[in-house]
Image: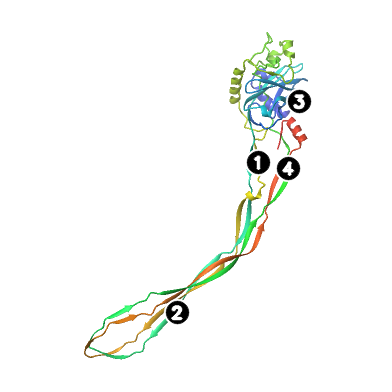
Amino acid sequence: MSAFRLSGFLATALLGSRVVAQTCLSYGVDFQSGGDYFQNISSTAPFTFASLFEGCDNDVANNILVDPNGDEYQCTDTPLQPDDVIELSTCPMDKNEMWTGDWSVLIISNNGDGDPIAYERDFYLSVGIPSTITYTPTVTITSTSTPLVMVTETSTIVSITTLLAKTTTVASVTKSPTVTITPPISTVVVTKTATLRKTAYTVVPVVVTTTKTASCSMPPSQRWPDPTCTITPTLVTAAALSTSDSGSSTSGGASPAATSATASPVAQKVRRGLFDRAVPLDRAARLAERKARREANNKLHRRAPDSATTTVTQTDTALYVTSTSVTTTDATTMTTTTVATSTSTSTPPVVTVKSGSTTLPVVTTTLKQSTTTKTVMTVLYTTVKTVTSSPTVKISVTSTNSQVAVACTAKGGRMT
């Protein structure tokens, strides 16, 4: 036995003396006991499964597929020798004929002159149409932005009027009613237009398609051998499951070592025709036991001999998402000036000579209107050039060689 399998064999040996005595072992490759797998219902390829054997005599194994209803289908035989060589068995059921549920394969053999074997590999299949995920790339436009800074300056013009001093004679008592009118401030708005040049940016992605050759990906090898068969097959009489006194089958799965010496010659050599199908009478009990056994011993995470999802890259560049990367240059400053006019009158002292009394008429005084000039700046943009970005978007296409794919499947692998 190879060093790679030694740990699995030693772990199995701890289960009891019946397993220790069993030297011919089978291991699952693509489908392993307790696993959970996806199968593509769109495929018309036949269902296959791979096994490898260790410590067996020169003989073949009869392989039986058991569906979720308990019905049996006889698959192609696989040789037991040489050790650690992956052998593929093909079943009489295409993937598009399968359905979701608990499945099993049974590995039955007389093992030449050695102890007969009867192993069982239980697993769960999720059968459906693979989903396709479309990836839409994001392309980036690089643009340049020039900030605009508006500065407002205020200039004030002050007008002062000074009156000359004078002497006047007024009555000793003067009644002088006056009215002062202050006009509102007048604002003169001056509009100026500034034109700034700008650059337009567009993006036209360039799609570059590269072809990748698919390679064969092998699943991690099972480190423990297949458990002893608990289903008594109908299509093939298993010597390893025969009782010592009558040669009839037992559902308890007696160990090969315990039955090989006393199994009847008929039980050891019975073989049915290839691709036969059988409906067992006790399949309801089989199904319940298998489901409970698989759920209790489910140690493997979900894997996929068939790919459950496929990711493709969107090729329509019009649907690509566009983002903008902005580079800022030095700011442009524009200055507007507001002119304010302030008017004031300086009145000198008046020399007054008082004599008598009089009443003056009403005097209405209207102050000079103050004017403010305000400049409003309007900014217009004109496009002087257009810059087109052409980012490269790489799309990878996988090419699968049909001959390599067949060889990969025969080894229990999957093309990726």
Q: Is residue 191 left or right of residue 412?
A: left
Q: What's the mark number on residue 311? A: 1
Amino acid type of the residue tagged 4 in the rendering = Lys
Image coordinates of residue 184 in percent, x first then y, are: 38, 74
Cα gap from disc 4 to disc 3, whole angstroms: 34 Å
Name the residue that disc number 4 marks: 212
Do residues under tags 4 and 3 come within 8 Å of each other at their CB atoms? no
Name the residue nearer the viewer: 411 or 199. Answer: 199
Callout in the foreground (1, 4): 1
Q: Which residue is at a point 66% across and 42% down the rendered structure image?
A: 312
- Report the quarter where the C terminus lies: top right
Name the residue nearer the viewer: 16 or 123. Answer: 123
Q: How many marks?
A: 4
Locate residue 13: give its quadrant.
top right
Name the residue that disc number 3 marks: 83
Secondary element under disc 4, as helix, strand or loop, is strand
Do residues under tags 1 and 4 come within 8 Å of each other at their CB atoms? no
Cα gap from disc 1 to disc 3, whole angstroms: 38 Å
Name the residue that disc number 2 marks: 157
Cα gap from disc 2 to disc 3, whole angstroms: 108 Å
* Mark 2 surroundings within 10 Å by alpha-carbon count, few (fewer than 14), some (14 through 19), many (20 or more): few
